[in-house]
Amino acid sequence: MTEELETAPKVHYICQTYVETKGMQANLQVDKLFQYTTADQAQERATRECRSENCAGADAYMIVEDPNSGEVGPPTFLVRHGTVPEMDDF
């Protein structure tokens, strides 16, 4: 493997779903997390998951990982369906 490939940033495409928890205040909680190899796959899964009865909302986003440091950048949202956390909560 060349040094260039080893240091190239890794892109992860994620679908994350949420459920509402009941209590004094309604809160969102992460329910499921799926990782895909393409943005389209993550977006399609978020759209499908949001249609399910127990799902409050779903995000599809991408994050970029630096393989040298292991640091992950902030999410770039591809699609957001239903009730999802505020952007500042990430």
Image: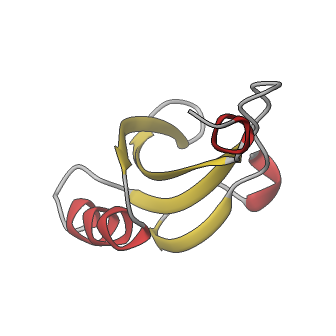
Where's residue 47, x and y in %? 29, 72
Q: Is 24 left or right of 51, judged from the image as shown?
A: right
Where's residue 8, x and y in %? 70, 46
Please report the residue visible at 79 percent of the width from the left and 46 percent of the height from the top.
73
Count numbered badges in the picture. Answer: 0
Q: In which quarter of the image is the N terminus?
A: top right
Please report the residue visible at 64 percent of the width from the left and 51 percent of the height from the top.
63
Q: Is residue 3 visible?
A: yes
Tell me: residue 62, above or below residue 4.
below
Q: How is the image coloured?
A: secondary structure
Which of the pair 59/44 is nearer the observer? 44
Image-quadrant location for residue 39: bottom left
Q: Residue furthest top?
A: 69
Where's residue 77, x and y in %? 61, 67
Tell me: residue 21, above or below residue 82.
above
Which of the pair 62/77 is nearer the observer? 62
Where's residue 84, x and y in %? 55, 59
Please report the residue visible at 17 percent of the width from the left and 59 percent of the height from the top.
52
Please report the residue visible at 83 percent of the width from the left and 54 percent of the height from the top.
88
